[in-house]
Image (cartoon, rainbow, N blue to C red):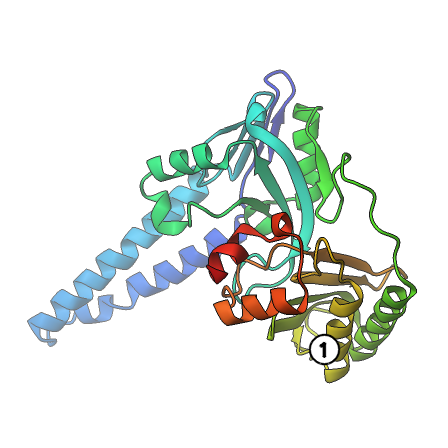
Amino acid sequence: MHASGRESITEYYPPRTGAIIALVFFLSMTALPGFVVFDGNQQPVMRVLGGLAMALFGFGVYAMLEDLLRPQPTLLVTDQGFTYRGFPHVAWAEVERVRLGIGRLRKGGRAEMFAEVVLCDPAEFRDRVLALGDVTMRRNPDRRLFIVAERLPVPVPTVVDVMREHHPGLSVRAVEDAPADAPPAAPRSPDRDMVESALVSALTDALPVGWNLAVLWFSLVGDDGHAGIQLELTDPDADHTDELQPSEEILTLLNRLKEVCYDQMTGTWLSGQVVLRAASTKAEFTLSFKEIPDWLPIPEPDECRRELATYPRAGDEIPIWLRQRIS
């Protein structure tokens, strides 16, 4: 990381560990075919194939050396905006707000802290992503802009704090926070409090010894349900899995939670998560009435119709994707 107060620039570079490991791998794979290439007793075809393999892995050595000797910043933040590696430059005027949360952003991935940059004009930004050419081969241009810790030397909240230093007017809030102008939420029913309490107890009982963070994620549209428990252990080397399957008791309580959260106008939740921290006595519930996680397949039309038949909601409260699915 490099920061310059005079130029008001903050740069974050990716950790070197990954590049060093990759360099060792490519060096090994470059050297191994040499035993074939320089062996005069080998057939010419094998020597040619060995030479091609050396050239291919040699290019990987060059790329890793380039990355180590002349690294490119993962994130560059200035008073005018920021540039996140693989995406076009974003001016602060384009940013509506930044949302902090914990979740699984990739299919099969682990729960992680992320910062979602909500743009004022996503369509215009999508056109700029497409204009980068090669980037479209690696990314879905319609996917929202997430900043994750994978290629950063510091935690995501630290990066967001630095962004706010460069742009004091930046709006930052947690994923579960409601807009300031949102209507007051309906009073919580005693049934919901009881179900949430029972769900937390069942989840706590299912966790192994030595857990530090647990995230129960779930989605239920009609009868199409998915759920899992992501774990962060105090001892990473402990003999435990970092992902658990919810028990039948937890699944039953999730169905009950969907029932007690129903409202005639807004319907009920389609997905959500419960975050437990060993150092805290309070569980964090995040429920979404309109979205499902990106890594899950869109439910079949019959399941979408079953959802609306079981939990009808006002027409303007039906998400666009759900409306398109049933049409």
**Image spot of residue 327 (x, y percent):** 46, 59
**Most foreground residue, 30 or 59:** 59
Left of 199 or right of it: where is 152? left
**Image spot of residue 122 (x, y percent):** 49, 37
Left of 110 or right of it: where is 259? right
**Most foreground residue, 287 or 126:** 287
Residue appearing at x 83%, y 43% in the figure = 184
**Image spot of residue 298 (x, y percent):** 50, 64
Left of 213 or right of it: where is 45? left
Q: Where, quadrant-wise, is the N terminus in this rendering?
A: top right
Residue appearing at x 65%, y 62% in the figure = 270
Residue 213 visible in the current orientation: yes
Mark 1 = which residue? 251
**Most foreground residue, 118 or 211:** 118
Secondary element at tag 1: helix
Residue 300 visible in the current orientation: no
Quadrant of the rendered structure where residue 289 is?
Answer: bottom right
Quadrant of the rendered structure where residue 241 is?
Answer: bottom right
Residue found at the very far left of the displayed protein = 44
* Residue 181, placed above or below residue 233: above
Residue appearing at x 39%, y 35% in the figure = 127
Q: Amino acid at mark 1?
A: Leu
**Image spot of residue 156 (x, y percent):** 66, 44
